Structures are given as structure tokens and as C-alpha cells.
Image: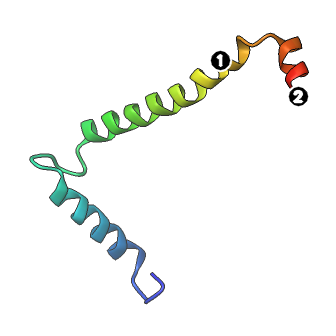
Amino acid sequence: MALGAEHASVIRLVVGEMETQLFGVKARDPMVFLVSIGAVFTASAAAAFLPARRAAAIDPIRALRHE
């Protein structure tokens, strides 16, 4: 876009390249969007939940003494 490309042409370029990497799947397939959103949500939930669970298991007095 810094070289004068329009917004729509950049989107077409990115989607077109992604579509060549998805063997047998269209880039605009709703199931692909749902599965990818689900995968990102699951990964982010695990990344937030696991450290929070570990932090909640620590005794507060022990944590304060460590610092």
C-alpha cells in the first residue's frame, strides 16, 4: 500500500496466495473460518487458563516471602 496499491487489490493478493496453499479448500469457505476461529480461541484460552491456574495454586504467604 505504501507503493500505491489499493486496499481491495492487497486483499485479493493475500486471499489469492492463501487459496493456493489450501489444498482442496476455498479460502472463503465458512467452515474454514469457523475451524480457524475455534483453534485460535482454544489456544488463547489455554494460554490464559493454565498460568492462571498455576498462580492460583500458590500459597500467598509463600509467594510474598519469595519476593
User: Outermost residue toward the left?
Assistant: 24
Question: The disc labelled 2 sits on which kind of residue?
Answer: Glu
Q: Nearer the viewer, residue 49 or 13?
A: 49
Q: Quadrant of the C terminus?
A: top right
Q: Is residue 4 left or right of residue 11?
A: right
Q: Residue at x 59, y 28 (%)?
A: 48
Q: Residues within 10 Å of mark 1 (few under 14, many from 20)?
A: few
Q: Nearer the viewer, residue 62 or 15?
A: 62
Q: Residue at x 43, y 89 (%)?
A: 3
- Ranked by sequence position, the earlier of labels 2 and 1 is 1
Q: Is residue 40 left or right of residue 23?
A: right
User: Outermost residue toward the bottom?
Assistant: 3
In the image, residue 43 above or below residue 2: above
Query: What is the quadrant of residue 13 in the picture?
Result: bottom left
As drawn, the label of residue 23 is none
Whole-angstrom CA distance, mark 2 to mark 1, is: 17 Å
* Percent of width and height locating residue 23: 11, 49
Q: Nearer the viewer, mark 2 or mark 1?
A: 2
Circle count: 2
Question: The disc labelled 1 sits on which kind of residue?
Answer: Arg
Q: Residue at x 40, y 37 (%)?
A: 37
Q: Is residue 23 left or right of residue 64?
A: left
* Percent of width and height locating residue 45: 53, 27
In the image, residue 4 above or below residue 33: below
Residue hosting label 1: 54
Residue hosting label 2: 67
In the image, residue 36 above or below residue 10: above
Q: Residue at x 80, y 10 (%)?
A: 59
Q: Quadrant of the N terminus?
A: bottom left
Q: Residues within 10 Å of mark 2 (few under 14, many from 20)?
A: few
Q: Secondary structure at mark 1?
A: helix
